[in-house]
Structure formats: structure tokens, C-alpha cells
Image (cartoon, rainbow, N blue to C red):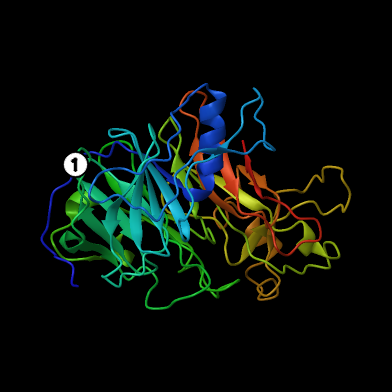
Amino acid sequence: MPLDTTPRLRKRTVVALAAVSIIIAVLVVGLGAGLHHRHSSSPSSASNANPSIDAVATPYLSLVTSNGSHPELIASGLSGVRTLVYDFSPNLLLALVKGTQQVVGIAVQDLSVRTVLDASALGLRLTHGLAIDDEYLYASSSSNVYRWPYNRTASSAVQSNAGVVLITNINNGTEGQHFTRTLVLSPSSPAYLFVQVGSRTNVDPDSSRARIRRFLLGSYNGTAIDYSEGQLVADGIRNGVAMGFSNDIALWVAGNGPDNVDRPDVVANMVQDSPVEPVYRIDQLGLRYGYPFCFAAGNTSMTFATAPNVGMMYAWPTFMNDTVHTDGFCRNGLNAVPPQAYMPAHSAPLALGFNPISNDMLVALHGSWDRTVPAGYSVVR
């Protein structure tokens, strides 16, 4: 079913995005702050209620927060949940379900579940990104960003055939290793949509698939905007899928570094602790962050002691002998901005958010697959 390309206007963004991996952090923080909701196993009586989803709050007794509370499973039966967005106005948790190509809403008060958007008949291949503002719901495939009119106070589902292709050609016509396209709306005016693209392979020949761009939403005139026309926010962040704004309206990004680094001139078996997963605060537009030519080292002492060169920039082995992309090149901040913080190698940050009171950053880590001692599988602060 084709998408309508009628242009529409947009109001100021008021809602933040969080990815599905952050759900544990949401529950832990909420319970830790003394927030409660009623448990219910009764589905919504609305016509678009989704009976295939089990929404019964089930406490995980083996997991305990610092104040003795337990995080809870609030919904199951969701096939391939990728992203969560909390809509403050109707107190609704929106989930993009990749397997069914739907966006479902879980009412925080009673855990009733309804279908907000059913895109299963459109063939869009939605993968990851989800965001909302006062008027629209946004979702992404590996190549496009789509937008639908969204009434936050209505109980009826979004009209799936009323969407438009807002941004196109994100992947430049090629699929690849990373298909996620995180979407973040700026919390202040003017209103921008930030869209990231991750690398096509483990180590690409250039940084064209490792960028974050932003789009002034008021510039949409009814024709899909090519991704290359967006303003460059950051270049050379390999897969900055974890992205969000802090309370002081600063954009933070946690990247996923490459695998299989081999620099025996630095340390044997370097892949165990390198590259670290970098965390950046984006204070200036258009800077270079190193990928694919550079990476930030982890602990190279092979001990439990803190190595002094953790976070130091090194040249990736396949480029280091080309007489240009040397270690010295990578230690020049104009070529590769070093990370402000970092997490263990291969722990794979998938989402980040900020505590609205303390401004502490919470990062959800998918977990490693290629190191002897696993890392990640957690939410860190």
C-alpha cells in the first residue's frame, strides 16, 4: 500500500526516545523512586486491543534494587521488540515490534495493551527507530524514515495509509551488518530529527556509513529528503545506536566498536579488551571521531590494574601502514575526537537515557560475544 506524500506541519518536540534495551533501567529507576502501578491481566476493551500480548506484571525476585524492590516483566508475546518510547500525555509506553511490524501501546496504569500502528501490510520493513512529538509518529527501516499523523489523546489506531516517506536513502542503496537507524527528536527549538547510520561491515573503507545527521523538520515540502542532505552532526562513530539528550540538552552517543583488532606491537590478544565502547558528548557539529581509521584502546596491561593508556587512540591495523593513518594521526583531535567516557570492549551499548532528576546517564548493554570473559548484559550508570 503506497504512502501518502501530502506535506504536513509539525509542532515542537516534547517527548523523549528510549530503546527497548533500556526497559530494565526504566523499571529499576521507577521502582527505586517509589513509583507504583496497578497489576492487571485484563486486556483493554478498546476495538484495537491486542489480545496476543500478555500484559501481567511479574516481579523478578532474583533481581533486587538498592532499596529492596524488584523489577517487573510488564509484557510478553512481543516478537522482536526493538524500541520503547514513553508518551507522557496518555501515560502510554509505545513499543516498536519488529516481528509483527506494529507499534503497540502499553498503558502504564493498568498494563492494558492496544495496537497504535499496524504497518504489517505496507512492506516497510521497520527495524528499530521510533519517536513521537505533538503531531507525528516516526519510525525507521534500514533505508527510510516514515511519519504518520499521531493524535496523543485518541484511543483509535493511527491510520497506516496516512504516512509519508520523510527521509530516504539512509543506507545509500546497500544493506549491511547494521540495520538500526536510531531516531531522536531535539527537545528544544528549532525542532530537528537526528538520524544515525551504522557501518556496513566490521571495518569499512571509509566513514560514509558511520554518521549522524540532523534534519530540520519544517523543511519537509512533500518530497522525501535524501539522507545525504541532512546536516552532518558527527562523522566516524561506527554504530552510534545509543543516542539521547541529557537534561541540559546535550546530545550524547555511545558507539559500538569493531571486532577482531590485532595489534601485536601493542599487546598480544588485544581483542580481549579493545576497542573500548566509546561515549561522546557532541558539543560541536561535524567533528570526526575516527572510524574506520582509528580506535580507542582498552586495558593493554592484561592485568586487573588500570592501564594508563585506556582510551588512547590507535590506528586500525589495516590502515596503519598507509603512511597517513598512523597512531600519531589518530592522536590528533582534528582527526579523531577521543571519547569522554568508555565501557568494556564488545559490551555493545544499545540505548541510553538520563535520569530526569539527577541527570545520571543510564546505558543498556547488549553484551559481548567475542571475548573470553563476557562483558555487558547489564544496565550501567
Residue at the spot 50% in from the left edge and 67% down from the top edge: 178
Q: Nearer the viewer, residue 286 or 18?
A: 18
- Looking at the rendered image, the quarter that the N terminus falls into is bottom left
Q: Is residue 69 left or right of residue 206?
A: right
Q: Position of residue 219 (x, y in %)?
A: 18, 54
Can the viewer see residue 200? yes
Amino acid type shown at disc 1:
Ala
Q: Position of residue 229 (x, y in %)?
A: 29, 63
Residue positioned most to the bottom: 174
What is the total number of numbered labels drawn onto the structure image? 1
Q: Nearer the viewer, residue 124 or 344?
A: 124
In which image quadrant can residue 112 be found?
top left
Q: Position of residue 203 (x, y in %)?
A: 60, 71
Against 213, residue 144 (above or below) is below
Can the viewer see residue 360? no
Residue positioned most to the front: 42
What crowding class fits label 1: few (fewer than 14 Cα within 10 Å), some (14-19), or many (20 or more)?
A: few
Residue positioned most to the right: 303
- Looking at the rendered image, the quarter that the C terminus falls into is top right
Residue at the spot 36% in from the left edge and 53% down from the top edge: 51
Under tag 1, what secondary structure? loop
In which image quadrant can residue 111 be found?
top left
Residue at the spot 32% in from the left edge and 66% down from the top edge: 144
In which image quadrant can residue 250 be found?
top left
Q: Is residue 306 left or right of residue 179?
A: right
Q: Position of residue 71 (x, y in %)?
A: 58, 35
Tell me the residue that label 1 is attached to.
154
